[in-house]
Image: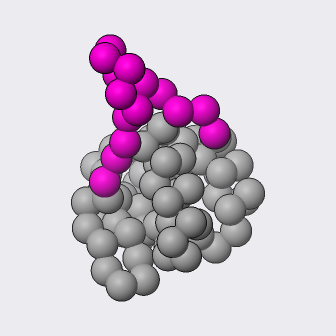
């Protein structure tokens, strides 16, 4: 994974919207969800600390092919939950 940097050459990072003892939650209210840098970074963190990443999205939300590929490669790390 290549790290992205800010204008002042500081590595960018991200935090989940919520965290429990076994899950990281990311809440998005979108119609299409892609494998953004935020999602890839949180997935990497979830794998590293052995937690699951739960994507909380509306029922009508579609996953872009890039996100479907990420889900396939990470196994059970990423879960979907309806708003």
Please state which of residues 21 and 36 is positioned toward the viewer in this rendering: 21
Percent from the top left, x then y, of residue 62? Answer: 50, 49
16 versus 11 height, above or below: below
In the rendered structure, does residue 51 fall within the stretch colored magenta? Answer: no
Q: Which span is picked out in magenta?
A: 1-15
For this orientation, the residue located farthest to the top is 7
Query: What colouring style does the render use?
Result: one colour
30 versus 48 height, above or below: above
Percent from the top left, x then y, of residue 56? Answer: 35, 63
Q: Residue at x 56, y 56 (%)?
A: 44
Residue 4 visible somewhere in the drawing: yes
Tell me the quadrant of the picture where the C terminus can be found.
Answer: bottom left
Residue 80 visible somewhere in the drawing: no
In the rendered view, does 22 fall on the left or right side of 68?
A: left
In the rendered view, does 45 fall on the left or right side of 47?
A: left
Type of secondary structure dominating the magenta stretch = loop
Q: Residue at x 63, y 39 (%)?
A: 1
Please state which of residues 61 and 34 is positioned toward the viewer in this rendering: 34
Q: Residue at x 25, y 60 (%)?
A: 17
1 versus 70 height, above or below: above
């Amino acid at each position: 994974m290549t790290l992205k940097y800010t204008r002042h050459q500081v590595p960018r990072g991200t935090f989940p919207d919520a965290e429990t003892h076994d899950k990281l939650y990311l809440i998005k209210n979108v119609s299409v969800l892609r494998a953004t840098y935020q999602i890839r970074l949180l997935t990497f963190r979830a794998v590293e600390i052995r937690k699951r990443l739960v994507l909380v999205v509306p029922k009508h939300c579609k996953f872009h092919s890039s996100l479907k590929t990420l889900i396939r490669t990470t196994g059970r790390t990423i879960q979907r939950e309806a708003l």
